[in-house]
Each structure stands twice: as C-alpha cells, then as structure tokens.
Amino acid sequence: MQSDPLGRVEFAVIGAVHRGALRSRQTVRQIPGLDREPAGEALMHEALRRCEHAGLLRSGRVPSGRHYELTPAGRMRLRSERRFRAALLGTLLRS
C-alpha cells in the first residue's frame, strides 16, 4: 500500500541523496531554493530524519560527518514518486 505522497522537501532530499550528495552539507547545496531559506539546513535535517525513520534512507557516521544512502525501499519510493509527479503534470498540462 502506497503511503501519502512525499512533501517537496522530502522528495528533494531523497533525490539529492540519490544523485550522490551523501553528506548533509552537500545535500543542502543540491536542493534548489532550500539553501537560500533562512531555516533551509534545519528543514533539510528534519526531512532527513523523517526519511530515515520511514526507512527510505539509512545513515552512518564517517570521519567527515554523517553519510546518507537510499535504502531499496527509498529507491522504489523515489521511482514511484517521479512517475506520480510526471503523470500529475501531464494531466495538468492537458487540462
């Protein structure tokens, strides 16, 4: 059963982790607009925690900070979200 669609920040965070921004400071730079928001880094960390709690990401400590990676469930969810958003956009453009 599919849960609710991911929020904008969660979707952007797992997308950035998928593209290879594996540490939190790198990740915030990969999310357009979030790095310019006053609380952007705090929003990103909260989204990382929510995604990790939901089983979409896993993290571990490395000497340079915390390392994030997508879980198999996270990869599946990212693909599903991309398909959903593309279908929604297609529907909106046709109407």
Image (tube, rainbow, N blue to C red):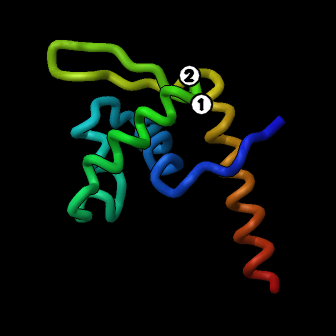
Q: Which secondary structure lies at badge 1?
A: helix
- The percent position of residue 55, horizontal first and vertical second, equals 57, 24
Q: Quadrant of the N terminus?
A: top right
Q: Determine whether, in the image, residue 26 is placed left or right of residue 90.
A: left
Numbered-mark total: 2
Q: Determine whether, in the image, residue 75 is placed left or right of residue 35.
A: right
The residue at 68%/32% (across/down) is 76
- The percent position of residue 21, horizontal first and vertical second, equals 34, 36
The residue sitting at the bottom extreme is: 95
Q: Pointers 2 and 1 in contact (CB under 8 A)? A: yes
> Vertically, is 69 above or below 44?
above
- The percent position of residue 16, horizontal first and vertical second, equals 42, 43
* Kind of residue at badge 2: Thr
Q: How far apart are marks 2 and 1 (CA)?
A: 5 Å
- Mark 1 lies on residue: 74
- Mark 2 lies on residue: 71
* Other residues around mark 2 within 10 Å, as few (<14) / some (14–19) / many (≥20): some
> Which of the 4 image quarters holds residue 31?
bottom left
